[in-house]
Structure formats: C-alpha cells, structure tokens
C-alpha cells in the first residue's frame, strides 16, 4: 500500500501494538479483524460508505462501530472504527489493511508470549508441506470442499504440533484471500518478519544445519544487515554442498553445484 493507505496502515499497526501490550487478547482481535475484512469484501455498498472521502470521519466510525460492535472483540471494533475514519487510496485498501492487521495481531500476541520464533517456523514448515505434498495442496484448494472442512483439515494436521497463532493463520490461509494457501502462508511470514523488524533468509543446504550452525549463520547475517535475521532452512540435495541464501531479492550462492556450473560455463565459453 502506498500514499495515504500506507500511512493509515502504519498508524493502525501502532495502535494495535499498544492495545496488545496493554493486555488485549491478540487472538480475539485477529479473528475480529479477519471477520470485518470478510464482511467489507462481501458488501461493496458498506465498503464504499466506510471509505467515502466526502463523508466525515466521525460518521464513518459510527457506521462501522454500529455494525460490528455487537459481533467483534471490543479492541477489534475500535481498530475497525478508527480505520474507517482514516483516508484510503481505494475502497479495497480498507479490507486489505484489516486483513494484514489481523496477521499483525496474532504475531504481536505470539511475540508477547515468547512464541513468535516458533510461529514463524511453524508457518514456514506448513507452507513447505503444502508445496511438497500435491494431495494436501489439492485438498486445500478443492472448490468442492467447504472452507470449514478445509479449516478442520488444517487443524487436524497442526493441533498439538504448532503454536496457536500459527494454527489460526494456517486456517485463515484457506480463505482464498491470497488465492492459494502457499501464497497466503508466504505473505503471513513476510508480515511476521516485518512486524518484528526482522529479515527472513531462505537457506538451502544439502544437509540439516545443527542449532549452533544456524545461530552462527544468523549472527553473521545480522551483523551484515544490521537487523535480526530469521532463518528458514530447506534441505535440498541439488545444492551438493555449501549454502544458497536468499534475502528478499538478493541471492548469495555458495553451493558446490553453482561453482561447478560456473566452471562448466567458463570451459564452454
């Protein structure tokens, strides 16, 4: 989001963080924000009224507070009302912002409980499971299955094995908002890292890294980028040896396979 929408989202994220730090139930807030986003997507007239730049901010706040007040957590209702009073570049930006804020609420709650690292790891692992398992991917994208059935499947796979916030987000990933489950989980991971002011490094290696190796690598990258770095490690036999790192658009390829390919290109060239 850019311009006024980006500024509005930043203000709301700060307000949300303050509320959760003050004891608001992050899970309930997240669920409420997701629900409000869904309603706004499904109700174009309400969406337009809630974002009409010609309407007074107080009138828009009163409108959405009256609609959602008896259905959502009080903090979620307050955030939605505040959001309606802000400026948005397009009517669709309000629902998109509430969707992202729902993720932020769950991440901040996990952070406060000391489970944010686990949440990020759980989301990444489930995303890899979806990508690597065609049967699971098909089951979660099957239009003949209800959203409730898909959520139940996700919960059955993760219950007792993943952080509560990660399970909630994994269930949310089947909503179709981000088109595919894998794309949704990837987006949630990015929001989680941004919320915690961290970078995410995708690490491909021929063998699993021991805990000490991961910590040393994370420390080196943190010093290089002047920010904490969260590692998502993928064991990939095609790398042969060494590591392939990707941080955003930057790729650092130190694998034996890449060096062999480079040598072959030099010989042929």
Image: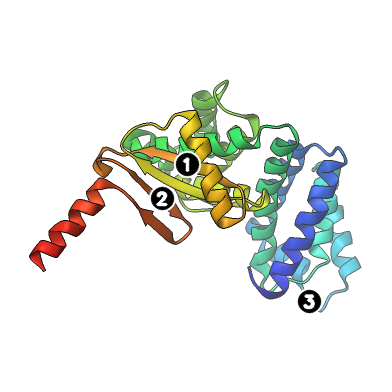
User: Looking at the picture, does residue 56 appear above or below residue 143?
Assistant: below
> Picture coordinates of residue 43 (x, y %)?
67, 59
Instruction: Describe the element under mark 1 as helix, strand or loop.
Output: strand
Comparing 66 with 234, the one in front is: 234
Mark 1 packing: few (<14 Cα in 10 Å), some, or many (20+)?
A: some
Which corner quadrant of the image does residue 105 belong to?
A: top right
In the picture, the quarter occupied by the N terminus is bottom right
Task: Evaluate if marks 2 and 1 touch, with contact meaning CB atoms under 8 Å apart.
Answer: no
| Residue for point 76% across, 38% down | 28
Which corner quadrant of the image does residue 237 belong to?
A: top left
Write down the residue under mark 2.
245
Residue at the extreme top:
160
Write down the residue under mark 1.
232
Going from N to C along the chain, the mark reached first, 2 or 3, is: 3
Comparing 263 with 100, the one in front is: 263
Comparing 244 with 167, the one in front is: 244
Going from N to C along the chain, the mark reached first, 2 or 1, is: 1
User: Looking at the picture, does residue 160 appear above or below residue 183?
Assistant: above
| Residue for point 14% across, 64% down | 266
Residue 176 appears in the picture as rendered:
no
Mark 2 packing: few (<14 Cα in 10 Å), some, or many (20+)?
A: some
Label count reads 3
> Picture coordinates of residue 25 (x, y %)?
80, 36
Q: Is residue 22 left or right of residue 130?
A: right
Tell which tag, 1 or 3, sits nearer the viewer: 1
Tell which tag, 2 or 3, sits nearer the viewer: 2
Instruction: Describe the element under mark 2 as helix, strand or loop.
Output: strand
> Which label was assigned to residue 53?
3
Q: Is residue 66 left or right of residue 35?
A: right
Distance from the alpha carbon under mark 1 to that under mark 3:
42 Å
């Amino acid at each position: 989001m850019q311009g006024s929408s980006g500024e509005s989202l930043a203000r709301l994220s700060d307000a949300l963080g303050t509320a959760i730090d003050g004891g608001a139930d992050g899970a309930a807030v997240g669920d409420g924000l997701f629900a409000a986003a869904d309603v706004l997507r499904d109700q174009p007239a309400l969406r337009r009224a809630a974002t009409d730049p010609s309407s007074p901010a107080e009138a828009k706040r009163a409108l959405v507070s009256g609609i959602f007040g008896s259905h959502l957590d009080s903090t979620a209702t307050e955030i939605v009302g505040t959001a309606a009073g802000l400026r948005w570049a397009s009517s669709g930006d309000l629902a998109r912002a509430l969707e992202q804020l729902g993720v932020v609420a769950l991440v901040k709650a996990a952070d406060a409980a000391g489970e944010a690292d686990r949440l990020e790891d759980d989301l990444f692992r489930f995303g890899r499971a979806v990508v690597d398992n065609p049967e699971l991917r098909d089951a979660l994208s099957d239009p003949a299955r209800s959203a409730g059935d898909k959520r139940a499947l996700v919960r059955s796979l993760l219950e007792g094995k993943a952080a509560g916030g990660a399970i909630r987000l994994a269930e949310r990933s089947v909503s179709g908002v981000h088109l595919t489950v894998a794309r949704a989980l990837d987006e949630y991971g990015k929001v989680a890292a941004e919320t915690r002011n961290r970078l995410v490094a995708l690490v491909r290696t021929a063998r699993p890294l021991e805990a000490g190796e991961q910590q040393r690598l994370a420390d080196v990258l943190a010093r290089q980028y002047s920010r904490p770095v969260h590692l998502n490690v993928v064991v990939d036999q095609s790398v042969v040896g060494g590591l392939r790192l990707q941080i955003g658009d930057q790729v650092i390829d130190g694998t034996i396979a890449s060096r062999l390919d480079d040598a072959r290109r030099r010989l042929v060239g």
